Amino acid sequence: MCLMDMEFKKLEDGTTEVMINTTAAREHVTDIERYIRSIKDRCRSVLSELPYKECMPDVFVIFLLKFVILWMNAFPAKNGVSDEFSPREIVTGLRLDYKKHCQARFGAYVEASYDADVTNTMNDRTAPCIVLGPTGNVQGSVNCFNLETKKVVTRRTIKSLPMPDRVIRRVKQLGKRCKQKRVGDRLQFLNRMKEQFSWGDGTEEYDETQGLVEPSPTDTLPAEIPGVELEGDYEQIQAVQDSPSAPSWLMEASAALTNANLRQTASPDAEIAGVVDDET
């Protein structure tokens, strides 16, 4: 028997193997709401470690939910049908592998390979990306958010790197364009009408716990490569101006005559000392 809300009313006549018990209006299903709360708690736990949690693109939240549900179904459920097999393995027959599906953490900065057919060129072979979790296939592919194209791509070869400050600024900039801002450090879950749910999720008493986390002494250190300055680190770059050249002797002579209040050319009426004009 499955406990579901009124949205699954249409499935009652479509199946005979499973009994679907739908609820009435305004009636809550405790098992479903408890599972939803567990998903929200794990989403907040993953989000609390990201350096750009104040503002990020909307697609990050979508893949965050997929990431959490993927790993919740990858372990045997408590009081489930099996203590050895996970729900994912029972349904799909696939088991996640640590070496393939745990290459990088959610939200980490990586350089993802293009896997181009022609590699003997001077084009870039990798792209800066943010990990959005594994796809769950057998090969261990990873969902990546390309910071240049702003699209979600699937890559099989990635290289985890320390996250520079310019990457954090880039993600926050994309988040502001998507207008995905949260209140404080809380992640809001809204319905399809972009409105808050009428019931609480049990987190109202934790609104003022932000000050309980002690700041780390390394929080103010820049996450950049030591001794390497990039063009993107400067907001405004001014052109280099050459220093003025030394004045020539003609310019110095002209300045000296001007300072002595003398004229550079002799007047036609001027008389030369010691010279007598024949006409006079």
Image: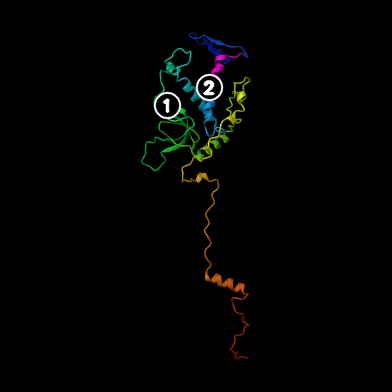
| Residue 41 % position (x, y) | 54, 23
Image side of residue 138 versus residue 266, left or right: left
Q: Secondary structure at mark 1?
A: helix
Residue identified by numbered label 1: 101
- Amino acid type, callout 1: His
Q: Earlier in the sequence, mark 2 or mark 1?
A: 2
Q: Is 54 part of what is drawn in magenta?
A: no
Secondary structure that dominates the magenta span: helix
| Residue 33 % position (x, y) | 57, 17
- In the image, is residue 27 above or below residue 250? above
Q: Quadrant of residue 5?
A: top right
| In-front residue for pair 147/205 | 205
- In the image, is residue 237 above or below residue 107? below
Q: Quadrant of the C terminus?
A: bottom right
| Residue 118 % position (x, y) | 37, 38
Q: Which residue occupies 39% across, 27% down?
A: 99
Q: Which residue occupies 54% across, 26% down?
A: 44
Crowd tier of the residue under label 1, counting other residues whose Cα lies within 10 Å: few below 14, some 14–19, many 20 or above: some
Magenta range is 27-40
Q: How many numbered discs sit on the rendered protein? A: 2
| In-front residue for pair 19/35 | 35
Residue identified by numbered label 2: 39
Q: Are marks 2 and 1 in contact (CB under 8 Å)?
A: no
Crowd tier of the residue under label 2, counting other residues whose Cα lies within 10 Å: few below 14, some 14–19, many 20 or above: some
The residue positioned farthest toward the left in the image shown: 120
Q: Quadrant of residue 120?
A: top left
- In the image, is residue 148 above or below residue 8? below
